[in-house]
Image (cartoon, rainbow, N blue to C red):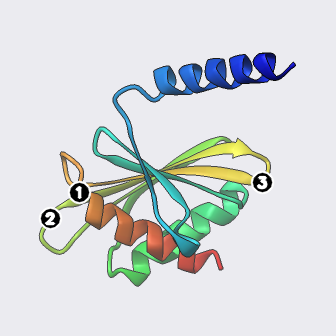
């Protein structure tokens, strides 16, 4: 029985490793939660429905001094676009993951700025508290 459990765990680890190929997981402590940094986007899941998370993201961008220039939202996904004072674009993409969970991807700049994206995520997390 124990060999079967080890086999299943090994198989699950292999599937996860293949699915995350090329990605870097960064786990931050405390309230920050787990982030996925992939191709210039910083992704995090929030335990809130899409509509609540969207409002939290809009509030967070305003709190950071960024005006939302464009927004496209429907029942399953959305995108908020803003610019920093220096003209660097900020894009927040929201996806309805479940009825009570939203996947949020933040990209700051054309190539992605992880520290800038972390600041946006921290502002979103504060807004959703």
Q: CA distance from mark 1 to mark 3?
A: 28 Å
Task: Read off the residue under disc 2.
Answer: 87
* Secondary element at image label 1: loop
Contact, mark 1 vs mark 3 (Cβ under 8 Å): no
Q: Quadrant of the N terminus?
A: top right
Determine the residue positioned at 51% across, 67% down: 57
Between tags 2 and 1, which lies in front? 1
* Secondary element at image label 2: loop
The tag earlier along the polypeptide, 3 or 2, is 2
Determine the residue positioned at 48% across, 20% down: 18
Task: Give the camera-side residue of 53 and 16.
Answer: 16
* Secondary element at image label 3: loop
Task: Read off the residue under disc 3.
Answer: 100
Between tags 3 and 2, which lies in front? 3
Task: Read off the residue under disc 1.
Answer: 113
- Residue 36 drawn above or below residue 3: below
Residue 74 visible, this angle:
no
Residue 70: image quadrant is bottom left
Q: Give percent across and percent down for residue 95.
A: 59, 44
Determine the residue positioned at 57% across, 78% down: 127
Q: Report whether 55 appears left or right of 90.
A: right
């Amino acid at each position: 029985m124990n060999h079967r459990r080890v086999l299943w765990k090994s198989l699950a680890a292999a599937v996860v490793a293949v699915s995350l190929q090329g990605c870097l997981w960064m786990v931050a402590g405390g309230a920050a939660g787990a982030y996925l940094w992939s191709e210039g986007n910083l992704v995090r899941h929030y335990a809130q429905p899409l509509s609540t998370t969207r409002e939290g993201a809009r509030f967070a961008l305003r709190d950071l001094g960024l005006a939302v220039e464009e927004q496209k939202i429907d029942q399953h996904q959305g995108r908020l676009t803003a610019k920093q004072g220096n003209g660097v674009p900020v894009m927040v993409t929201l996806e309805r993951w479940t009825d009570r969970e939203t996947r949020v991807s933040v990209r700051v700049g054309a190539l992605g700025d992880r520290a800038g994206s972390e600041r946006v995520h921290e502002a979103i997390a504060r807004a959703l508290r």
